[in-house]
Amino acid sequence: MDLSALRQERKKWLTWKNIRPYQEAIARLPVYDCVEVILGDVVDIQIEGLCEADAKQIEETAKMMKPWRKGPFRINELFIDSEWQSQIKYNLLEPHFNLEGKIVGDIGCNNGYYLFRMLTHQPKKLIGFDPSAIYYSQFQFIDHFIRSGIVYEMLGVEHVEYYEHKFDVLFCLGVLYHRADPVGMLKSLYKGLNDKGELILDTFMIDGDDEVCLTPKERYSKIPNIYFVPTVNALKNWCYRAGFERVEVLDIRKTDLTEQRKTEWIDTQSLEDFLDPNDPNKTVEGYPAPKRVYMKAYKAN
């Protein structure tokens, strides 16, 4: 697969009439030399001597790019209160990975929140994959100040196995349930890993010991492109069929309103709108409410 030609084609997406204003606004942002970055629960950017006019320009640029799904971020006094409190997932996973000196990829990286957090682990290289011009623009906006060196590819999971090099660690968080062929996707991730590589995965799950999965008729939690919601044992079998040697369950957690909620930075519905108002243990369609399993899959030599 010729990824260079695909990259050139997708760069054209940045000229679309709904994306071009983002790109133009980012290009107009001033460059600051004195910037302090604190990569904690909030990706905190502090610009020394930021004037009122520049602060207003930065705020207007950030607001035009809504919705902000992942975060949170802060730029001086501006707080981008994202829909997802992404630090909850990141802090859950952080004790289970070692990225120092490794080539790391984040599949479905959104605006790069997790990638920015990973900088503290001193990886050899960080690469994000997400075929969204909006999320890429959000990443560019934040990275305008951080200048991280992170590589952001507007490519999808199907391109990972054809990438110019293999990865030591791949993250795939909240993507698998969007794919109509989950085993095929896991095979692509497997092929994208170096020997002894690791996949860190999270996806929706249903309770039960049987090796089965829920297949929503039309929507799950109001989301149209949710195809399969497996039990943990079914998900393990998918990983084994994809080639992984060993699978470890890191945690299982129900998604709640402390992690995903409506804010002024999304202007759309969120978890509270996706659940049955009379029974929060069910979605509006009557399926089990969203619960996630966090797993680590290992590739053999």
Image (cartoon, rainbow, N blue to C red):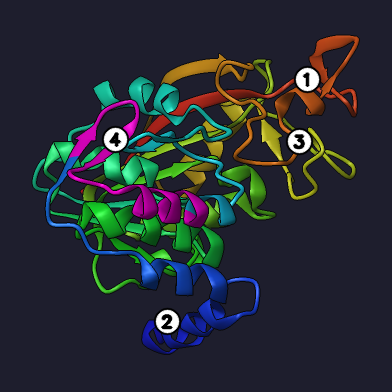
Q: CA distance from mark 1 to mark 3?
A: 19 Å
Q: Position of residue 212 (x, y in %)?
A: 71, 30
Residue 301 in the image, given as x and y percentages of width and height: 20, 49
Mark 2 belongs to which amino acid? Arg
Q: CA distance from mark 3 to mark 4?
A: 26 Å
Quadrant of the rendered image containing residue 204: top right
Cβ atoms at labels 2 and 4 below 8 Å apart = no
Q: Which residues are magenta?
A: 37-61
Q: Nearer the viewer, mark 1 or mark 3?
A: 3
* Number of on-image labels: 4
**Closer-to-camera residue (23/134):** 23
The kind of secondary structure element at disc 4 is: strand
The residue closer to the viewer here, 175 or 120, is 120
The tag earlier along the polypeptide, 4 or 1, is: 4
Labels 2 and 1: the sequence-earlier one = 2
**Tag 2 or tag 3, which sits nearer the N-term?**
2
Residue placed furthest toward the front = 52
User: Residue 44, labelled with which disc?
Assistant: 4
Kind of residue at disc 3: Gln
Q: Residues within 10 Å of mark 2 (few under 14, many from 20)?
A: few
Q: Residue at x 46, y 68 (%)?
A: 25
Residue 267 seen anywhere in this rendered image of the structure: yes
